[in-house]
Image (cartoon, helix red, strand yellow):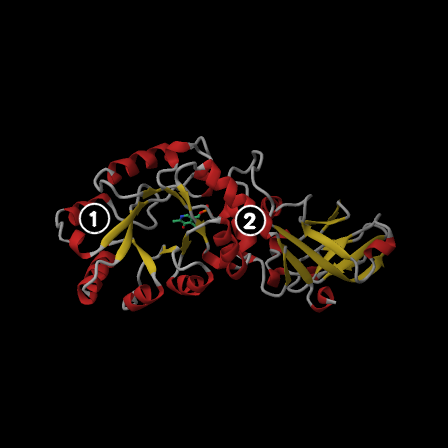
């Protein structure tokens, strides 16, 4: 059986991903809703996720790297637009043209390269521009925009498809940065009349229509991550994870469990070992603090998370239910990606994108 060959089964609910995209598209109303596919669709598998969203009607996709864009191209309809967020690496124009990818130009050097490429190809090749409105990560500073506009020849060289920026604090609806960035974006956009604009990531989709512009770019929300942690999640969970019990044993008072002997039983306890570990993205930080679920009942991680296994304290669960071969839930209705993130001191994005490559994958 598949679950016996791999240590755990990762279930990706494509119907949930599709429903999440539909909700996002409905929420942004007249704006278009893209789908961010970087990091293998946040670990869920771009091969399966991209065609499902295309089937749902999505026609704009984003990747971070050129290579991701090249992998994505054959997975989506020919009339789809694929933006590459990190822009063109030197010497890669032919790949953008050949694969029909559109670079996001983030700095003057990328703009200069793209303009030179257009002259060489004698074509007005499409590109997007990203402005930095307060995150200081990617994008043109206002002075770069001044220089570009001072030399209007660029308009004859490349075809500007999209003006975009990215919010630093969209997951915190009350944060003053949201409004400040939106206002800076409005000022910059006004300098490129008639060009479609895009500001919203997942969280910003839920900040209201002032953030929607012409195109929203959600990633995390498609995959069920809560856009505003701490509030009700409007999205459907898209991943489940079940691991198999490899061994089940009683320990007695004074017996140690796991590396570093960091768990010592204070009395008779039943310990179940499951076949998933930090090499599968179940963070070692969850040692002694994370949980798994057996039929909806919480069982704590006992001791240190190993590379390929985790020991759980399953005392009190009927023995037959925690025998070798039985399964326990790690991502389920009782424990979402956001719940795991909270226990692991991180965000749902990191939990999802770290999920390993050794799981048996099932797509629903
Ligand atoms: C990753 C990314 C997104 C998607 O962000 P989510 O928070 O996952 O919705 C959108 N835009 C840019 C520039 C990004 O880097």
The spot of residue 119 in percent (x, y) is 17, 63
The image quarter in which residue 196 lies? top left
Residue 289 image label: none
Judged left or right of residue 236, residue 333 is: right
Indicate if the residue with disc 1 has its beta carbon within 8 Å of ligand 1. no
Q: Is residue 358 above or below residue 31?
A: below
| Residue pointed to by mark 1 | 144
Picture quadrant of residue 325: bottom right
Disc 2 under 8 Å from ligand 1? The reply is no
Q: Residue at x 60, y 55 (%)?
A: 283
Q: x%, y% of residue 316?
A: 84, 47
Looking at the image, is mark 1 or mark 2 earlier in the sequence?
Answer: 2
197 relative position to 267: left or right: left
Give the percent coordinates (x, y) of residue 1.
74, 67
- State the image coordinates of residue 318 (x, y, percent, origin top left): 86, 51
Q: How many marks?
A: 2
3D distance between C-alphas at marks 1 and 2: 38 Å
In the image, 185 versus 190, the foreground residue is 190
Residue 239 located left or right of residue 4: left
Locate residue 166: give its quadrant.
Answer: top left
Q: Which of marks 1 and 2 is in front?
A: 2
Secondary structure under badge 2?
Answer: helix
Q: In which quarter of the image is the C terminus?
A: bottom right
Q: What element carries label 1?
A: helix
Q: Closest to the observer: 279 or 72? A: 72
Q: Can residue 254 be seen in this view?
A: no
Residue 117 visible (yes or no): yes
At x 85%, y 58%, the residue is 250
Image point (16%, 48%), residue name: 147
Q: Is residue 11 above or below residue 341?
A: below
Count residues near mark 2 (Cα–Cα under 10 Å), then give few for <14, some for 14-19, many for 20+: many
Disc 2 target residue = 17
């Amino acid at each position: 059986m598949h679950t016996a060959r791999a240590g755990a089964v990762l279930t990706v609910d494509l119907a949930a991903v599709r429903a999440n995209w539909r909700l996002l598209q409905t929420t942004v109303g007249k704006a278009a809703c893209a789908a961010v596919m970087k990091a293998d669709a946040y670990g869920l598998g771009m091969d399966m996720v991209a065609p499902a969203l295309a089937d749902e009607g999505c026609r704009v996709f984003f990747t971070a790297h050129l290579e991701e864009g090249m992998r994505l191209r054959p997975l989506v309809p020919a009339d789809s637009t694929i933006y590459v967020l990190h822009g063109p690496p030197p010497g890669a124009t032919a790949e953008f043209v050949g694969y029909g990818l559109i670079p996001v130009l983030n700095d003057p050097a990328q703009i200069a390269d793209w303009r030179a490429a257009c002259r060489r190809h004698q074509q007005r090749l499409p590109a997007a521009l990203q402005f930095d409105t307060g995150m200081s990560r990617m994008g043109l500073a206002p002075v770069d925009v001044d220089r570009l506009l001072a030399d209007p020849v660029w308009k004859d060289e490349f075809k500007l498809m999209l003006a975009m920026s990215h919010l630093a604090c969209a997951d915190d609806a009350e944060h003053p940065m949201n409004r400040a960035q939106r206002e800076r974006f409005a000022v910059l956009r006004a300098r490129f009349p008639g060009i479609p604009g895009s500001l919203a990531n997942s969280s910003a989709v839920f900040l209201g229509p002032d953030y929607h512009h012409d195109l929203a770019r959600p990633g995390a929300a498609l995959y069920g991550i809560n856009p505003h942690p701490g509030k009700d999640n409007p999205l459907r969970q898209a991943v489940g994870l079940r691991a198999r019990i490899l061994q089940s044993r009683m320990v007695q008072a004074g017996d140690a469990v796991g590396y570093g002997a960091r768990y010592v039983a204070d009395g008779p306890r039943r310990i179940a070992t499951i076949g998933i570990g930090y090499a599968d993205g179940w963070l070692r930080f969850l040692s002694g603090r994370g949980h798994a679920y057996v039929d909806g009942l919480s069982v704590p991680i006992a001791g240190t998370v190993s590379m390929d296994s985790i020991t759980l304290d399953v005392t009190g669960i009927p023995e037959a239910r925690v025998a070798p071969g039985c399964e326990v839930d790690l991502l389920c209705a009782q424990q979402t990606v956001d719940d795991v993130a909270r226990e692991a001191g991180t965000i749902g994005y990191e939990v999802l994108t770290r999920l390993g490559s050794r799981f048996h994958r099932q797509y629903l």
